[in-house]
Image (spheres, rainbow, N blue to C red):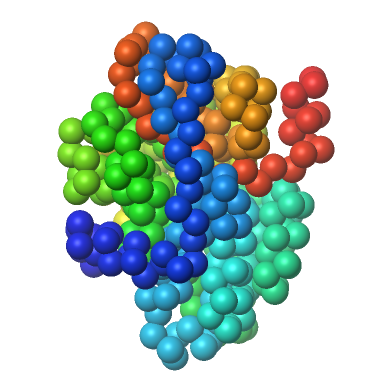
Amino acid sequence: MKIDRHSIEQAHERIKPYIHRTPVFTSKSINEATGCQVYLKCENFQKVGAFKARGAMNAALSLDEEDLAKGLATHSSGNHAQALARAAKILGTKSFIVMPRTAPEIKKRGVRGYGGEIFECEPNLASREATLAEVIKKTGATEIHPFNNYDVIEGQATAAKELFADVRELDVIMVPVGGGGMLSGTALAAKYFSPNTKVIAGEPAGSDDAYRSLKSGKIEEAQSQSIADGLLTRLGDKTFPIIREQVSEVITVTDEEILAAMRLVWERVKIVIETSSAVPLAALIKEKERFKDQRVGIIFSGGNVDLEKVLKLMTQ
């Protein structure tokens, strides 16, 4: 499947009735902390509290009636899980969601709230994939992968498309990377809607497989050791080729840097973002001398926070 300007525009029209056009915020405090003019695309205000609503909805709407009627299945640490359960509910079908037992409770509640049936697994990729295979064998449901799916990638591209329409002439756009659905979608949106904008990813140092994959030229395994629970997976064979061609670099950040960036947003911008969302801002702050006086767009990927867990981290 080829994703191009026209197919991204079609995806955007397809999902528009089911998503928010999220706002772009600016903050003097963020500009001072980074030395840049920063534009914050707030997907934490999206349906289900995350950008994943876009890709899941586009993928579900792209299925034929027969596959949709079988029900939808996926594995996810939380945001895609909620997004797919919501899409299934809207389209009148069932959803079967494999989630790590350690996934934030707020995300599990969200899935159940949309009528999704949860199957818990161990918090590693092998267990997620094995459990999902069992669920699909048992239910006959249609799999919609959280990132390694061209319809999902196309849907995720619409967030950056909106940002490029709202803010012209960005020098850089920065997003977090886990499996690469948002990053590959953002890279394609930049290619077709803002070709002079550099695409850079932020990634947890404790799960730096995208950084290593760009260096080695092949998909590397993830270690999955970070507070950024939404990013603890490796790239896919559909996302990686796009990232390898279109993404300038990946900047890694420590958990301490992620937490500091998240705290800055909570305290100064007065909005709630989750740890994964804070990663690109942490990367920008870490490397701020390189980006001095540039116009930088950041996509805040979501705001689904396990408050008890995060408050403990902030007060340690």
Q: Where is residue 214 in the image (x, y as percent from the top left)?
A: 31, 35
The residue located at (35%, 48%) in the rendering is 162
Image: 17 above or below 313: below
Whether 188 is drawn above or below 287: the answer is below
Image vertical order of residue 23 relative to residue 170, above or below? below
In the shown orientation, is residue 312 left or right of residue 264? Answer: right
Which residue is at the front of the view, 50 or 208? 50
Picture quadrant of residue 128:
bottom right
Q: Residue furthest bottom?
A: 66
Quarter the C terminus occupies: top right
**Vertical placement of residue 92 versus 77, above or below:** below
Q: Which residue is drawn at 43% across and 56% down?
A: 147
Q: Quadrant of residue 170?
A: top left
Q: Kindly identify the residue that appears in the image at 26 percent across and 27 percent down.
A: 171
- Is 201 left or right of 20, judged from the image as shown? left
Which sits in the foreground, 315 or 263? 263
Nearer to the camera, 261 or 16: 16
- The x and y percentages for residue 299 are 44, 39
Q: In which quadrant of the rendered image does the N terminus lie?
A: bottom left
Does the image show residue 121? Answer: no
Q: Which residue lies furthest to the top in this view?
A: 289
Q: Return the x and y of residue 7 as percentages of the image width and height.
A: 24, 64
Residue 53 in view in this figure: yes
